Image (spheres, helix red, strand yellow):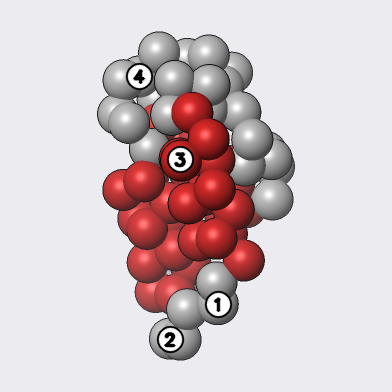
């Protein structure tokens, strides 16, 4: 994983509530963030985070990070 991709994954993970509830279909918030970054999951699966987290995920997903 390149540095910019790693930073984006960390930025996505930082937005998630860290409940590890698995309601998104992934075993952890970190795994879900990685799947969003890899394009394997949509950013609208975090029900516990509510609309605030969904909006932040969408914003962070579309933000390009410089390497």
Residue for point 40% across, 13% down: 21
Q: Is residue 1 visible?
A: no
Residue 10, picture quadrant: bottom left
Name the residue beneath numbered marker 1.
64
Does the residue at mark 4 contact the one at mark 2 (Cβ under 8 Å)? no
**Residue 29, image x and y in percent?**
40, 31
Q: How far apart are marks 4 and 3 (CA)?
A: 15 Å
Name the residue beneath numbered marker 4.
20
Residue for point 32% across, 31% down: 17
First-in-chain label (4 vs 1): 4
SS class, disc 4: loop
Residue 67, picture quadrant: bottom left
How dense is the environment of label 1, judged by Cα within 10 Å: few (below 14), some, or many (20 and up)?
Answer: few
Disc number at residue 53? Answer: 3
How dense is the environment of label 2, judged by Cα within 10 Å: few (below 14), some, or many (20 and up)?
Answer: few
Of the two numbered discs 1 and 2 in the rendering, the one whose residue sits closer to the viewer: 1
**Residue 8, image x and y in percent?**
44, 63
First-in-chain label (4 vs 2): 4
SS class, disc 2: loop
Name the residue beneath numbered marker 2.
67
**Residue 33, image x and y in percent?**
48, 43
Q: Which of 13 and 5 is in front in this view?
A: 13
Q: Nearer the viewer, residue 5 or 57?
A: 57
Q: In this view, does 63 lie above or below 15?
A: below
First-in-chain label (3 vs 1): 3
């Amino acid at each position: 994983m390149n540095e910019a991709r790693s930073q984006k994954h960390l930025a996505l993970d930082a937005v998630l509530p860290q409940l590890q509830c698995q309601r998104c279909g992934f075993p952890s918030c970190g795994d879900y963030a990685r799947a969003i970054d890899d394009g394997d999951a949509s950013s609208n699966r975090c029900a516990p985070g509510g609309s605030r987290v969904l909006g932040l995920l969408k914003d962070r997903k579309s933000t390009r990070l410089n390497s």
